[in-house]
Image (tube, rainbow, N blue to C red):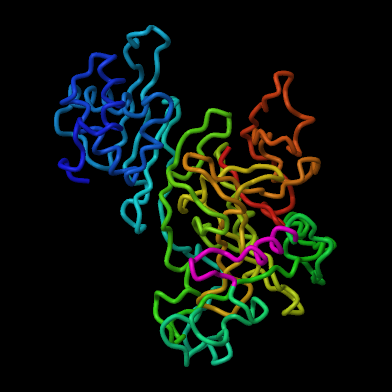
Amino acid sequence: MQQAMLTNKDEKVLKALERTRQLDIPDEKTMPVLMKLLEEAGGNWSYIKLDNYTALVDAIYSVEDENKQSEGSSNGSSIQVVQKQPQLSNGDRKRKYKSRIADITKGSESVKIPLVDDVGSEAVPKFTYIPHNIVYQSAYLHVSLARISDEDCCANCKGNCLSADFPCTCARETSGEYAYTKEGLLKEKFLDTCLKMKKEPDSFPKVYCKDCPLERDHDKGTYGKCDGHLIRKFIKECWRKCGCDMQCGNRVVQRGIRCQLQVYFTQEGKGWGLRTLQDLPKGTFICEYIGEILTNTELYDRNVRSSSERHTYPVTLDADWGSEKDLKDEEALCLDATICGNVARFINHRCEDANMIDIPIEIETPDRHYYHIAFFTLRDVKAMDELTWDYMIDFNDKSHPVKAFRCCCGSESCRDRKIKGSQGKSIERRKIVSAKKQQGSKEVSKKRK
């Protein structure tokens, strides 16, 4: 954003200046910070105006304090943490400054994703940002163009498959119809079916393992009874061996994040969260769940060795397991974003009425033991709303290792209401519960508590 585009004659700028002038902050200090905030927010004024321009005020004082401590030490990706803000002129309260990172992706995504902390009391989470899944050690993941047969691609297509007279070969996974609209949104019918499958899994077909890796007792080396694996609906996107170009309408997830997002520290006891800085229509692709690809055994061993009370729950890749008589351990895969991951690791759980859903995406391999997990909006989402996802946790399962936090989702349909405190607020339990089962079985995902 150029300075010529931002003048103190603009109505929006004038309102921001009125607030900072009340705090005796001169315009020459306000304008450069306002320009930078707008640039990082993609020109979205909703973030700037939030809570009476406190984002702007905090940023100004943070820059001022940093300049006093070490002139020239800050840069575009530095984290600014200040303990206390001076008393406001109206005497309402003292505020802590926010931690701030201009782009938590370190330039690895096509859009910048900032991190802010309005509370100012939480350390920035330590992890390595990666834009694509990586194999940890023993996980079986074989990606090869030679493995993609003519039946697994649309080699004869050109341009945009969605503009063709007939659906291409890749559309077979969605019953011969494309899952995406020409606007790049997920079709409502497909979205609703995926949601029903998640809410009413017993009404859809399942497959059962003779020896289920998810029910393995690592201490005894035995297997328990398989609870069944839902045959989930897939989206098969076109890929490199297909004849269409990269702008084909059947290539959405693989093009990466396009929305304006922001990582922020929530004030509801949920820790870090993810919100949108723009209005999003129903069916919008938000991001992929990115992490390390581990086997179930590797994940179990990692959790046993871990002494950290803060943890990101894994996602089990659980689909179409009936294609093999015996699923080998190296083919029972999980995604863990504890050490390496993307912004999806910050998505908080919400019972029943979350505004996003996870959907399997097949791209570079026809092997169903590995696929991508993509998040799409279930309804229209307004700018500054938190993006949430139902982890499908059974809070009544006392033995399950996923029982590692008390739900603070705030939903009227919260499944963890009965263990809440007398004030109606959840008491956070950070210690990971030990158990013999692996973490992340069935439809379970993650949390950073």
Can you name the residue that lies furthest to the top here? Answer: 91
On the picture, is 407 further left or further right than 100? right
Q: Is there any visible trace of residue 331 in the rendered image?
A: yes
- In the rendered image, residue 415, in percent from the top left (x then y), is placed at 76, 39
Q: Nearer the viewer, residue 171 or 207?
A: 171
On the rendered image, what quadrant is the C terminus found in?
top right
Residue 230 image position (x, y, % from top left): 75, 66
Q: Where 419 falls versus 448 (above or below)?
A: above
Percent coordinates x, y for residue 443 in the rendering:
70, 56
Q: Magenta residues, as a range?
A: 179-196
| Left or right side of 248 for 449 | right
Which of 221 and 100 lies nearest the eye of the viewer?
100
Name which quarter of the figure residue 73 lies in: top left
Position of residue 432 relative to residue 216, above or below, is above
Q: Quadrant of residue 30?
A: top left
Membership of 401 in magenta stretch = no
Q: Against 378, is 157 above or below? A: below
Q: In the rendered view, does 328 fall on the left or right side of 206?
A: left
Q: Nearer the viewer, residue 424 or 190?
A: 190
155 lies above or below 231: below
Please state the total of marks drawn on the protein image: 0
Q: Does residue 268 appear left or right of residue 238 in this picture?
A: right
Q: Is residue 291 visible?
A: no
Foreground pick, 306 / 353: 353
Q: Residue at x 54, y 47 (%)?
A: 381
Residue 239 at x, y = what percent?
47, 79
